[in-house]
Image (tube, grey):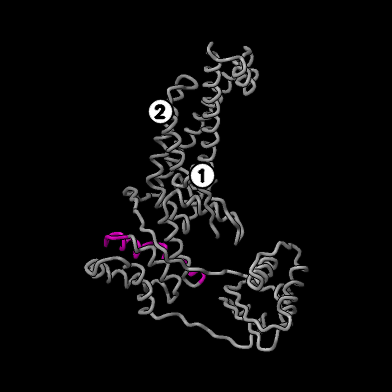
Amino acid sequence: MAEALVCVIIEQLASITTQELKLVVGVDEQVQKLATNFQIIQVVLNDAEKRQVKEKPVKLWLDKLKDVAYDVEDVLDEWNTAIFKSEIYKEAKFDNITPAVRRKVWSIIPSTSSYLSQVKELFSRHDIAHKIKELNEKLDEIVREKEIFGFELARGFEEVERKKTTSFVNVSNICGRDKDRVAKAIIQEVEGRSPTITELETLLQNVHTLIKGKKFFLVLDDVWTEDYEIWELFRLVLQTGAQGSRILVTTRKRRVSEIMGSAYEINLEALCDEDCWLIFSKIAFLEKHLEHRKKLEDIGREIAKKCKGLPLAARTLGSLMRFKKSRERWNNVLDSSLWELEDVEKGLFAPLLLSYYELPFTMKRCFSYCAVFPKDYVIILMIWSNYGWHKDISTQKKIWIWK
């Protein structure tokens, strides 16, 4: 996240340094210093973000950096606003502007024509310059502090053009925490339309009406909730189905199975290393020549062992390695310190975290943006483009993503 934020600020600073109009004398040197400081910090952020998981001092350093970076963003917004006002004021002085247009311009900055307003604008410019100087002093301290940690320098940013694919994997992820959402999902599957009802009691009555006397097969995938009261609401309604109805629940928690009163349990054992390798290699070596596969197979088998028998981890790592072509980059993943983390969700955390760190800096920020929203929320990607987070999004198309 810090890397994404810093990259955006560096782009903004580069744009500002090309502007001919300056706010006050000497401020351009301070802006250039800001850019230099951020560029110095940028080359160590990749290593810093990886180490923050295990090293609290590094995390505190990154938090301090992000606080300053957000302050810089605010000041740059003030800068651009001041420049915009100056340009409008300059254009408003032209004699060839019609009175009607001039009145519209003055309506935007109504008091600019007065002497008092000009003095106020001058103080505002000096205030912005003073803020930039103060932020530079804070950044100087952050730059000095980074030497304490001995970060590894980035070797450069490699942009890999990924080939388009029509292969998709769909996971329902109804985890049971949102009672309304589960009820709506059942109604939508039965009726083929999304219900507009919001009250839970009414939703459950609709479910009762739809399945009463009918045989059904309901799948609740990846259930996490351990709240008996939540499940009891649905259990009473679902008991009205015809004899022979079945409910299949997938979960990682035995407690969930006990709460739901499962008649049968199927415990899926972890895959063997060879099966993990088959899943991993099928994705990692997709569209790669046989010679390329032979060159990387020994490292790939060691990486596959890191999956600890989890097929999702094997698939995630396979997708991560698919676009890495050199032994050096494969070894970097194999030797990553993230594997030394304590087991989180039985080993799945490290592969997912590795994939996150491989995202382009713009996508890291978009990823964080998605985390603000609940599951199954429709997100308009156009806002990413407005924030400057992802410039490849066309302004002519409405693009939607279902999380």
User: Residue 277, position in %: x, y?
Assistant: 35, 75
Would you call the spot at circle 2 few (<14 residues within 10 Å), some (14-19), or many (20 or more)?
few
Tag shown at residue 2: none
Q: Is 259 within the magenta? A: no
Along the viewing direction, whichever of 223 and 298 lies nearer the viewer: 223
Q: Is 339 within the magenta? A: yes
Q: Nearer the viewer, mark 1 or mark 2?
A: 2
Please indicate, yes or no, whether residue 340 appears anywhere in the rendered image: no
Along the viewing direction, whichever of 187 and 340 lies nearer the viewer: 187
Which of disc 2 and disc 1 is earlier in sequence?
2
Q: Locate residue 29: give its quadrant.
A: top left
The residue located at (49%, 20%) in the rendering is 24
Q: Label 1 to label 2, Cα distance in Å?
A: 25 Å
| Left-right relation of 143 to 252 | left
Span colored in magenta: 324-345
- In this view, 268 is above or below 400: below
Residue at the disc numbered 1: 66
The residue located at (23%, 67%) in the rendering is 295
| Left-right relation of 133 to 111 | left
| Left-right relation of 208 to 285 | right
User: Residue 198, position in %: x, y?
Assistant: 73, 62
Residue at the disc numbered 2: 18
User: Residue 220, position in %: x, y?
Assistant: 61, 75
Three-letter residue code for mark 1:
Lys
Q: Locate residue 278: give its quadrant.
A: bottom left
User: Residue 137, position in %: x, y?
Assistant: 48, 33
Would you call the spot at circle 1 few (<14 residues within 10 Å), some (14-19), or many (20 or more)?
some
